[in-house]
Image (tube, grey):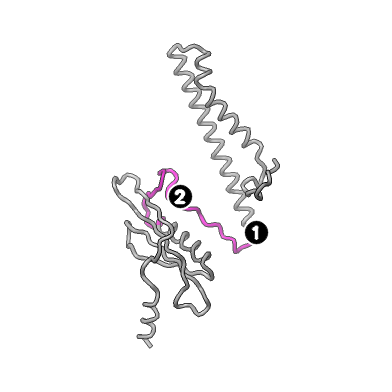
Amino acid sequence: MKRQRRANKDQRSSDLGRVIARRILSEQGVVGRKIVVSIGLPRPDPLSKHGDWECPFLIDGVGNSEVQRNLGVDSLQALMGAIRGIRVGLEQTGRNLYWLDADIGADIPLDVPTVWGKRLEERVRLAIERETVRVWRARIKTGKAKIRAEEAELRRQRTEPSKIATALAEEKKYLQRWGAEIANLKPGWSIPSPPGERRKR
């Protein structure tokens, strides 16, 4: 019986198989360190009697680099669970890992549970919209402060007012347009419109 159990366990391949996605991360403050995150192609789970799937993934370069698997009823659930597993695995390292920008981090989305129904999903989406607008407004405010500082510096350099206005006109126009777009947003703005349909504001 033990031998049979061990044989069944060995049926589950320990390799990634065909890699379908990969991301290379760096660690803030550590020069030259590379952490490679890989996801293998979802495949039928050889131990399942119900047609379940597994999706292998690997976080290489930090901690115990072993292929892990997420199981799912179908290939999509297994894949989404693997992405969730990577996010959790990176967080558990306690390290400041990032992809393109240290402020953004690994840029692997936070999973929003949908099993509790549409009502919770809607509340979470609206909260994300509110926070997004708050961040955008803060960036516009920072941009305006930067423009004021640049204007003050140009005045100190005795630059002609017309040249100051010309030098900063594009930045001001961009921030004004961005602010106007944000002011016109209505709840639900983050929901993609059907193809060919324009969203009403």
Residue nearest the observer in this picture, 20 or 80: 20
Above-or-below relation of 152 to 75: above
Q: Nearer the viewer, residue 8 or 118?
A: 8
Q: Residue furthest front?
A: 196
* Magenta stretch in the rendered image: 90-118
Where is residue 180? Give x, y as percent: 63, 32
Provide residue 66's location: percent of width, then percent of height.
34, 65
Q: Amino acid at mark 2?
A: Asp
Q: Position of residue 104 (x, y in %)?
A: 45, 45
In-image side of 183 versus 102 (left or right): right
Which is nearer the eye, 191 or 44? 44
- Please, which residue is most extreme toward the left here? 32
The relative height of residue 68 versus residue 132 in the rendered view (above or below) is below
Answer few, some or many: residues within 10 Å of disc 1's Cα (few below 14, many 20 plus, some between 14 and 19): few
Q: Residue at x 48, y 69 (%)?
A: 71
Between the residue at mark 1 and the residue at mark 2, the CA separation in whole angstroms equals: 25 Å
Left or right: 61 in relation to 153 = left
Q: Residue at x 46, y 69 (%)?
A: 43
Q: Which residue is mark 1?
A: 118
Q: Secondary structure at mark 1?
A: helix
- Image quarter (top left, top right, bottom left or bottom right) of the C terminus: top right
**Crowd rating for badge 2 (residues with CA inside 10 Å; few <14, some 14–19, many 20+):** some
Disc 1 marks which amino acid? Lys
Q: Is residue 11 above or below residue 96?
A: below
* Mark 2, residue position: 107
